[in-house]
Amino acid sequence: MSISPTLALVERLAEEAGAILLAGYEQEHQLSYKGDIDLVTEIDRRSEEFLVGELRRHFPDHRILAEEGGGSDGGMCQWYIDPLDGTVNYAHGVPFFCVSIAYATEGRLTLAAVYDPMRRELFSAEGGQGAHLNGRRLGVRPGGELNRSLLVTGFPYDIRSTAATNLDHFARFATLSQGVRRLGSAALDLCYVAAGRFDGYWELSLKPWDLAAGALIASEAGAMVTPISGAGELLAPPYSVLAASPAIHAAMAATLRR
């Protein structure tokens, strides 16, 4: 019988994978493409190999869903791994990327860590125990109105072929809020909502490894985290997300559903 995962272990693995990203930063990379603009580097694979290897060593009976290696989704004990969230940023030398790790039992997220090695910021959460940044308790920005809120979003990798580009929502929120940013890492966007740096975040189509860790961290910090439709499971297709301060969640949801 394997031991139960701990937050300390998840945090350690995130930091050690982050060291791999940092060592390869601003080096010449071996690039390959999964789509027109969806790329992967050898560092993505190196980080994932480390994380999957460690998890299989500690928890051989657990399922692992990881970005570059695929894997199984569902089951009693499930890991969600993004070894390098923000690969396009990373490949271009833009210092905004992270490692994202989440653990779920019986479909419920219980442990999460997101590590930004450039800023040495470790966001983490345990179900029912709150969210933290380098040990400091996090909380979403209290109160507020949509027209005084700073928002963040992302765009799909198939933006050249899909009708759901998110450009219409971006334009609408740009006129309804204080501003909208696009930074290129879903996991960090969610953590920035948790830290009160952004008031709200939405995205139309992601993958479960993009969402899982940041969703738990944002939720434990007091954000309302839901699918854009308001119904169904967050970690189920189409993997849309709306994470916002309770003060503006309803207004953002109404705008997105028009």
Image: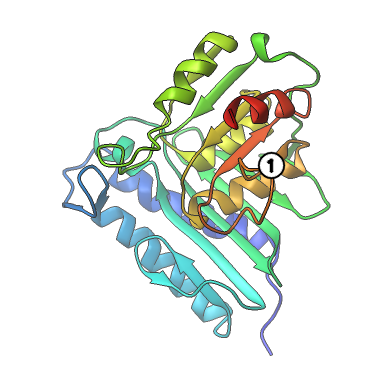
Q: Pinpoint residue 98: horizontal percent, then vertical percent.
A: 46, 43
**Quick one: quadrant of the N terminus?**
bottom right
The residue at the point 60 percent across, 32 percent down is 257
Tally of numbered tags: 1
The residue at the point 57 percent across, 59 percent down is 236
The residue at the point 63 percent across, 64 percent down is 103
In this rendering, position of residue 105 left or right of residue 68: right
In this rendering, position of residue 184 left or right of residue 2: left
In this rendering, position of residue 230 left or right of residue 201: right
Q: Does residue 99 lie above or below 243 as drawn?
A: below
| Mark 1, other Cα within 10 Å: few <14 / some 14–19 / many ≥20 | many
How is colour applied across the structure in the image?
A: rainbow
Image quadrant in which you'd find residue 50:
bottom left
In what element is the residue under mark 1? strand
Using the image as rendered, state which of residue 120 and residue 159 is in the foreground. Answer: 159
Q: Pinpoint residue 213: horizontal percent, then vertical percent.
A: 60, 51
Q: Does residue 110 lie above or below 18 as drawn?
A: below
The residue at the point 56 percent across, 47 percent down is 114
What residue occupies the far bottom of the structure in this picture? 1
Q: Pinpoint residue 68: horizontal percent, then vertical percent.
A: 34, 62
Judging by the rendered image, the residue that carries numbered circle 1 is 225
In this rendering, position of residue 38 left or right of residue 201: left
What residue occupies the far right of the structure in this picture? 128
The amino acid type, in three-letter code, at marker 1 is: Val
Q: Pinpoint residue 218: horizontal percent, then vertical percent.
A: 68, 40
